[in-house]
Amino acid sequence: MLFVDKLKEKDALIRPEFESFFAEIIKNQPHPGELLIWINNGFYNPDVLKFEGKDGKKLNPLVIGPGSIGHSEDAHYRFIHKYRTQYLYEKNFTEYVKLLEWTPERRKEIDGLIEFEETTIQLEMLIYLKFWESDSIIKTFYELTRLVSGETYDWYFKVQESNRDKDATGNRQDLILKHIKPKLKERFPKMWDAINEAYKPQLRNSIAHSNYSFQGRNIHPNNYIENDQYNTIQNVTFDEWIEIFHTLISFHNSYIWLKNKVNRFYAEHALANGNMIEVIVREKEGKEYPICLSYRPEFEDWRFCKV
């Protein structure tokens, strides 16, 4: 379940951090068009090399567009959006907790509340995985933390799918823990705190493998290992889960806000400059060259300029 007062509480901490994040990226990005590449998911698509242009030359495999990860994100967004609009609880969190104060006369009512709570948490766990397992989300924050640090956009980013995947940037957990979080800790501590609260690898693994149980208003991950620094969680109360999940949803809300903000930012610049914005394409071998993207106001989207 979602509580409006909890979401407002989380948004008050997280949204201003995203606003600062956007301003710092605009200031620090190596080229003014880097964020435009990000919002259009620039990526390397080797399948393009199978085709030739009208001049008989191979087509450029560095492309823009949603690709498979973008279409996947759209499917997950629809599910998340439906949940956050249909499962808003009519009472605030404090009022809800009072409803759970046990008395013998209200036993059946309280049991019903907890049973419903378990069901919603099962749905929320699915959303939790949709967020932290999403290639698009991980790529987003990998690229953004590069740009805010003054690094260039990585056209060749790829999430590792197996140990045989030798050209990948890294696996999901390492990308979050070693590439994304360290670049946020000093400069954007509230964003770092939000990820720290919402991203718990042990809990994610427990959910992904259906390796947990409910007892009372408690979630018990079954992957606790004594004296193992990476598997220290023995119990997560439902109230603790509410904090985790509301942080996640607020983070996702601010992520959607950022995408819309970036698109509007470049659209305004394009409309004042013949509907065109220059970006830099960078090949793995080091070659780089400018190319322009054209904005289509009727669709609010972007295409490579026609040559």
Image (tube, helix red, strand yellow):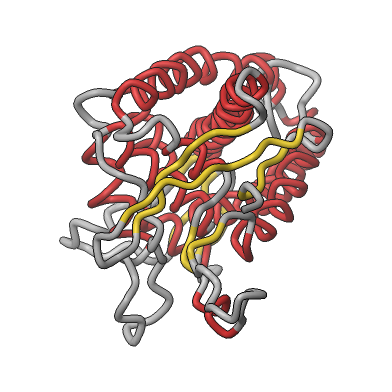
| Left/right of residue 106 with respect to residue 226 in the rendered view | right
Q: Position of residue 298 (x, y in %)?
A: 83, 33
Q: Which residue is situated farthest in the front direction here?
A: 55
Q: Position of residue 277 (x, y in %)?
A: 54, 33
| Whether residue 190 is situated above or below residue 129 in the rendered picture | above
Quadrant position of the N terminus in the picture: top right
Q: Which residue is drawn at 53% across and 80% down?
A: 49
In the rendered image, is residue 110 in sight?
A: no
| Whether residue 43 is situated above or below residue 121 in the rendered picture | below
Work out whether residue 61 or residue 7 is closer to the camera in this orientation and state it: 61
In the rendered image, is residue 238 in sight?
A: yes
Number of marks present in the image shown: 0
| Left/right of residue 273 with respect to residue 241 in the rendered view | right
| Left/right of residue 110 with respect to residue 21 in the rendered view | right
Q: Residue at x 69, y 59 (%)?
A: 71
Q: Residue 160 is drawn in which quadrant? A: bottom left
Q: Position of residue 198 (x, y in %)?
A: 44, 40
Q: Where is residue 275 in the image (x, y as percent from the top left)?
A: 66, 30
Q: Residue 141 is drawn in which quadrant? A: top left
Q: Which residue is drawn at 35% across and 34% down?
A: 31
